[in-house]
Amino acid sequence: MSSHDRTLRVGMVGYAFMGAAHSQAWRTVNRVFDLPARVRMTTVCGRDEAKVAEAADRLGWDGHTTDWRRLVESDEIDVVDICTPGDSHGEIALAALAAGKHVLCEKPLANTVAEAREMTAAADRARESGVRAMCGFNYRRVPAVALMRRLVADGRLGEIRHVRAVYLQDWIVDPQFPLVWRLQKDRAGSGALGDIGAHIIDLTQYVTGQLITGVSALTETFVRERPLPAESSGPAAQADGNGRATGPVTVDDAAVFVARLDGGALATYEATRFATGRKNALRVEINGSRGSVVFDLERLNELEFFDATRPAAEQGFSRILVTEPEHPYLSAWWPPGHIIGYEHSFTHQMRDFVEAIATGVDPTPSFADALQVQLVLDAVTRSASAAAWVEVECKEGAPVNASGRGGGPA
Ligand code: SOE
């Protein structure tokens, strides 16, 4: 927190898609929500001087730098927002926490469990001096997801029996799509699994309050060689039929897995970048003994609810329009029926982060929550390569189902 007023001076590292989404949220958060602190978009950081200078101007940052270490060490920065590929999350977060900066880190937290553990331990140490850390699982902050979680918590679905989650994209179906960083293991850690699978792992654990205890998984890489990006300094290039330099895809294009949750539910997950025609299709369905609920990101202002306690002749999935002011965040926006969008989840994320910092409480999802997701990602990867059921270690090191519930194949 700056010395002279309740201002949080933010430094953001990375300015591509997530950097742009975060910038929109930083620009908006104090204009929509009445918060105990104001953010100042102080510095954006990127490797290319000309490009980051242009991004600073376009995205609304006061200044720019090409040196993230200088940003992290600066006395003019209170918060570090990490919007870079996963291979730099660890070193930036560790340096920022050691420098006493609050940290928001994009998901997944890291590329490996070891890094995620180190980051979580550093966040735990930093918390003792009032430093806060959060991981950017933004879909938790869609009001319809909050309603979904409340219906489960209030017992309206009864005993949770099934969780069914998909996250479907198709942006790399064309084999000529270049070998960008998201397709390289050393940069991204994994492919669809960590990028979009992480979201449905976090979301289902968040909504149900249950943890994944074990998985059985398949992964596939459908296109194994791609043209190098124009400015690539990437992996050893070969030449394709047209003489263009190509490189190996080293991550999964798709991951599908079944899982047990520690409350006894069975779950199925599908994360793919090859669902032709599906652009950003996240859907979660939960079936319980007293009802079911469905969230679909393409209709993010709505929730489908089936109440099995109603008279049979009146039963059916009802469509709840989640725009009333009693739902989280919505009283700050527009009157009922005036819907919100994808970008609002990031503004809600910044709202909660700023309030947590200003009031001295821990924001969620914490790095420990994100470590739990990382442990599931790791279990899925190990299961797929071993063609076997793999128990998920919990963040404290014991298997999640040490509680005796859930567990491997019946
Ligand atoms: C992948 O293309 C991606 O940008 C993810 O990285 C984001 O987390 C997701 O919200 C949208 O899709």
Image (cartoon, grey):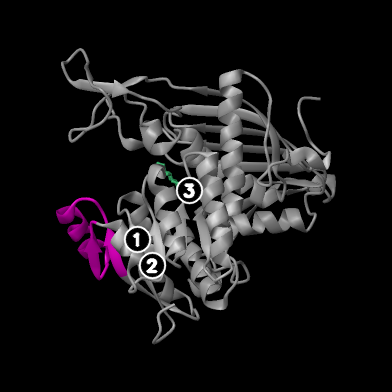
List the single residue furthest toward the top.
241
Q: Where does residue 53 sit, x and y in percent of width and height?
A: 18, 60
- Residue type beneath disc 2: Trp
Q: Distance between the residues labelled 2 and 3?
A: 18 Å
- Residue type beneath disc 3: Lys
Of residues 88 and 329, which is closer to you in this image?
88
Q: Where does residue 224 sit, x and y in percent of width and height?
A: 37, 19
Closer to viewer: mark 1 or mark 2: 1
Residue at point 36%, 24% (across, down): 249
Image: 385 above or below 147: above
Instruction: Quadrant for the C terminus, please.
Output: top right
Task: Give the residue pinned by disc 1.
Answer: 12
Residue 258 lies in quadrant:
top right
Horizontally, is 85 left or right of 356 in the view? left
* Of callouts 3 and 1, the N-terminal one: 1
Q: Where does residue 367 sit, x and y in percent of width and height?
A: 56, 54
Task: Give the residue pinned by disc 3.
Answer: 107
Query: Quick check: is the Cβ at mark 3 less than 8 Å away from ligand 1?
Result: yes
Task: Sort mark 2 into few (<14), some (14-19) or many (20+) by Cα contacts within 10 Å.
Answer: many
- Residue type beneath disc 1: Met
Task: Give the residue pinned by disc 2.
Answer: 26
